[in-house]
Image (cartoon, rainbow, N blue to C red):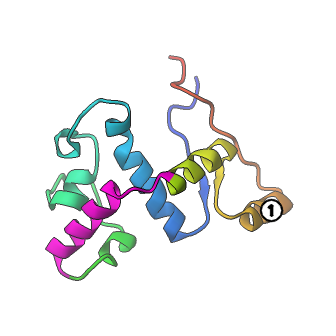
Amino acid sequence: MADRFKSMIVEKDNYLLECGRYIERNPLRVGIVKDLRKYRWSSFGVYGCGEEDGLTDRHEIYKNMGKDPFRRQRAYVEYVFSNRDREEQEIREKMGRGIIGTEGFQTIIARKGIEVKRPGRGRPRK
């Protein structure tokens, strides 16, 4: 059976936040929804709207976006909808390599002999 979910090595919190943004925007990108609040399989409702879903934990990176919950939500929404084409392209390219981080970080992983299974393209076969 093919892997349904993909995991990658991520270097720093700023890359992790950018990966989360990329994933959060996928339903918009592929045209599943026009409003992220209406996509129930996303954490956007929790992080951006303050909803409770009983599943999503609020990550420390999110908590560091502000002490006031309403400002934190606003900061998250602004981040998700900000124009970050260059960063998004960089994440997309690094996802193909299986390691998301600087070139130096990728070299360190290679030197340590850590095997990185590069994700396949598209949906796995059933």
Q: Is residue 70 magenta?
A: yes
Q: Residues within 10 Å of mark 1 (few under 14, many from 20)?
A: few
- Residue 56 found in image quarter: bottom left
Instruction: Name which residue type carries label 1.
Output: Thr
Residue 73 placed where, x, y %? 21, 67
Residue annotated with mark 1 = 107
- Decide: is 28 above or below 66: above
Q: Secondary structure at mark 1?
A: helix
Q: Which residues are magenta?
A: 68-85
Q: Position of residue 102 (x, y in %)?
A: 68, 64
Q: Quadrant of residue 31?
A: top left
Q: What residue sits 44% from the left and 63% below the top?
A: 17
Q: Does 71 lie within the magenta span?
A: yes
Does residue 46 appear in the picture of this structure?
A: yes
Question: What secondary structure do most residues of the magenta stretch adopt?
Answer: helix
Q: Name the one closer to the observer, 69 or 85.
A: 85
